Image (tube, rainbow, N blue to C red):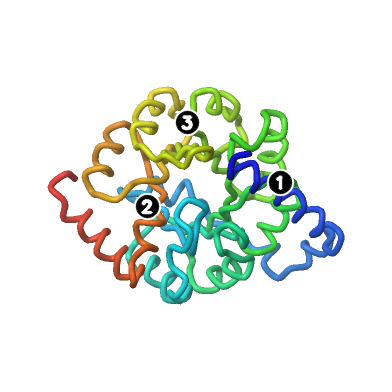
Amino acid sequence: MTILDKIIDFKRSEIDSLKKYVSYSDLEKYPNFNDTTTSLKERIKKNYFGIIAEHKRMSPSKSIINSHSNLDEIINGYTSAGVSGISVLTDKKYFGGSNEDIINANKLTDLPILRKEFIIDEIQIVEAKALGADAILLISSCLDKNLLKSLSESAKKLNLEVLVEIHSLKELKNCLLQTVDIIGVNNRNLKTFDVDTKTSKDLSKYIPEEFTKISESGISSTEEIYELQNCGYDGFLIGENFMKNEDPALAILNFMNELRNSKWI
């Protein structure tokens, strides 16, 4: 059993517990449920670099990445640095996140917030809207085509944008849907956790132009941004490169300044 299999198994039990205590109507009463959402894809398109900065305390591949930094300082730092959006991990067991992280982030920034979660059930999408997210992540390798379609349709009914993450051409073919806004190529193989930006370079030409196209994981230099932009990528989801630093807010500010002054751009 891979780490991904273990995560999905745990999610199923987590969802079963959630449904015992929280109903759809309960979630619809949350203060943020009726908030107007902000378009992540539009923010990516309007920003030359299209950076989605991620808040992530830990991961199965790296264990603890950053357990001491203050969420408020990180979100404020990401916002001040001029990123296009913010990704917030809400999985607690494997990534050290929480639903409260999105609620608190939503109070601190006007930037669109992506709920980064292993979504396999509609109630997680309703929950995302209730927490104040503007977009959700669907991981193609965790979902069959019919479920991916159903979940993306549920998200659109709530005015949430849909980012579908892929790692192969087969996964891409399953997500070419009108209800998908952004296609993200994950350079990390979720079964082995090997990382190679060549994955993004190889798959780029197969992604239709009507989708906003981003590259995820393993991006740490301005040169890599330049190379991937030349392959047609509109944006980049980066987390560990910032979070592994003592001061993630300063790390992203330096990175964005380096991008703006780079010889590659």
| Residue drawn 39% across the image and 63% down it | 243
| Residue drawn 45% across the image and 27% down it | 207
* Spatial CA span between label 1 and label 2: 31 Å
Indicate the quadrant containing the N terminus: top left, top right, bottom left or bottom right: top right
Q: Nearer the viewer, residue 108 or 199?
A: 199
Which residue is label 3 attached to? Answer: 210
State which tag comes first along the sequence, 1 or 2.
1
User: Are the residues at dot 3 and dot 2 in contact (C-beta closer than 8 Å)?
Assistant: no
Indicate the quadrant containing the C terminus: top left, top right, bottom left or bottom right: top left
Amino acid found under the numbered disc labelled 1:
Asp
Amino acid found under the numbered disc labelled 3:
Glu
Q: Can you give x and y, in whole percent of width and height, for residue 238 in the image? A: 39, 52
Quarter-of-image position of residue 99: bottom right
- How many numbered circles are shown? 3
Q: Nearer the viewer, residue 165 or 9?
A: 9
Residue 89 numbered tag = none
Which residue is label 2 attached to? Answer: 51
Q: Nearer the viewer, mark 1 or mark 2?
A: 1
Disc 2 secondary structure class: strand
Please give left or right for residue 26 compared with residue 241 in the image: right
Would you say residue 56 is visible in this rendering? no
Amino acid found under the numbered disc labelled 2:
Ile
* Spatial CA span between label 3 and label 1: 34 Å
Q: Can you give x and y, in whole percent of width and height, for residue 184 in the image? A: 47, 39
Please give left or right for residue 53 compared with residue 159 in the image: left
Which residue is label 1 attached to? Answer: 9
Q: Can you give x and y, in whole percent of width and height, for residue 63 in the image? A: 48, 59
